[in-house]
Amino acid sequence: MNKRKKKITPARAASGFVKYFSLTFFAFIALLPLVSVLITALKNNEEYASTNVMSLPSKINFANFADAFTTANMGRAFINSTIILVFVLLISTLLGTQIAYVLNRFKFKGNAAIRNLFLFATLIPGIAMQVSVYEIMTNLGLINKLYGYIILMCGTDVISIYVYLQYFENLPTSLDESGVIDGAGYFRIYRSILLPLLKPAIVTSCILKGVGTYNEYYCANLYLQDKKNYSTVATSLYTFVGPLGSQYNMICAGVIISLLPALIVFLVCQKQIYAGLTAGSVKG
Amino acid sequence: MEENIKKKLDLKTYFHTTKGRQLVTLICFSFVPLLLLIVFTYYPFVQMVGFSFFKMKYIGAKEFVGWKNFVKVFSEPEYFSSLKLSFFYMAGSLLQLAIALYLATILSFKVKGGNVFKGFMFFPFLINGIAVGFIFKFFFTRGFVFDTVLGWCGFDLENLPYWLRDQSINNWSLVGTSVWRYFGQNMVLFIGAIMSVDANLYEAAMLDGCNRFQQFIHIILPNIRTVLVLNVILSITGSLSAFEPPYVITSGANGTATYFVKMHEVAHTSQKVGQASAMAVVLLVIIIFATVLQKLFFKYAFKNVEDDSYSAKRRNRRRRAF
């Protein structure tokens, strides 16, 4: 018997039990719906019809994934989502860092007013506005165009501006001054000195914005109505609404396919995602 | 003529001064973001307020009706009762915050496999809304996942309600999906806040013989209350605009249509654009009101706390930012 070991009192044991019990319980709740979906996605039609949803498949079967992929035209959807993602991230990074640079480094009349304009915009729930945004999109001829949707997604990007603003606060202005002494213009200072230093903030806000854009379905559904050519991964799942609505083994496979990219990004970039959320929440 | 040339020269030299170059950069860098902000947020906002006084569809004639649309929002039970559903979501989000805070406290200290638990609980936040809709339609179907698990726990299927159809329970089912989706995200926020508390405080407390519960009450809670209060208020405004769970899971059938689902239906199915705009404006006024209250609350509630380093830091940061 090793007496030097920390004494395990009943109270300590109980609190340890409560701790791990709660963690396991909530992890179970978080995973249960996902695991059940995965189990069902692996069953063939017969087995799906004849067994309970929670019983494991006798043989692992990937046919549903192929079916779901072709039925919902997910190949096209993945291409569209990729195009949208690339452009939205590029444009919003460029615009976000530039406006944040100006707001943080320049003193001018109206600086506070512009900040407040952006701040107030975060209060307006996006869905409420779609009634009139829809009319604007129609008038500008942006409906059923990938670029129309991309422009809209860049135009409603306010949170990442806050991430950048916050990050700029921590970059000392002496950096800019040394640039000025070396004869660099403002654009040069932004491009060559500050932008490289902003990299962590850019990575963070791109991951958050990327996941958000990939998962966005309300505007995608409203403004990309031609589902055959312009569906995104999220809206391609709408294919399963209606007559296919009870073929859950195929639907579940579709669901799993649609969340795989998010899962991969999560596994690779966990730290940045957590950091980005925490930074974004302090926007006040 | 000569004066004109002089002016031009002045302008030219002006653009070479610090001020002038700043102005050029300013215009270049802020023109597009501001244009987008105006076109997609402020212009539609103003337009929407205008729409709310008309009886109109997307296409066709408009008819000015004054305050009639607004009166309807409050007088017709169809609209007003949907606002009452927010209370379900408010209750749900308070529960969600409590769970998140509890788990965040556990995970902020040394726990075996803490990161894995954190990851499992956070992941639902990253799933798109439509997928969540399918997952829970499947989950709550009669005799499927939820019923099976309850069966394991000894419940009889005969006694269980139809989770999405039974009007006495279906709103709670939907609130549950929302809690499922967001508690992990709240938890991550809280962990971030708890981690920013000075670790020396815990050590000091340990030396003074405080137990975990006392540490929670006297160290964690006071230090993270800014984040906590902020999230409580956000959850209230969020509940008013609850939309996704009923929209993707039940399409608002069987008495689950929240205010926003109703508004979406009025706007896009029956195309009563004026009425929908009035609904949006009413909600916006409520949200703005709540936000102003929040600002005042922060201003006065934390005014007298001098030694609270965390909120002081936050306030400073905010003062610098705005």
Image (cartoon, coloured by chain):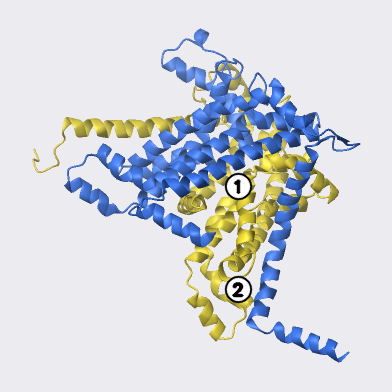
Chain colours: A yellow, B blue
* Res A212 label: 1
The residue under the point 61% across, 59% down is A115
* Res A184 label: none
Amino acid type, residue under disc 1 in the picture: Gly
In this rendering, position of residue B241 left or right of residue A143 = left
Amino acid type, residue under disc 2 in the picture: Arg
Q: Whole-percent x and y of residue B117? A: 40, 40
Residue pointed to by mark 2 = A191
Quadrant the N terminus of chain B occupies: bottom right
Q: Secondary structure at mark 1?
A: helix
Q: Whole-percent x and y of residue A80? A: 71, 49
Q: Whole-percent x and y of residue B232? A: 48, 38
- Above/below status of A72 relative to B80: below
Dot 2, how many residues are within 10 Å of its Cα: few (below 14), some (14-19), or many (20+)?
few
The residue under the point 33% across, 30% down is A21
Q: Earlier in the sequence, mark 1 or mark 2?
A: 2
Disc 1 is attached to a residue of which chain? Answer: A
Q: Is residue B206 visible?
A: yes
Q: Residue furthest toward the right?
A: B61
State the image quarter where residue A60 is shown: top right
- Above/below status of B18 relative to B80: below
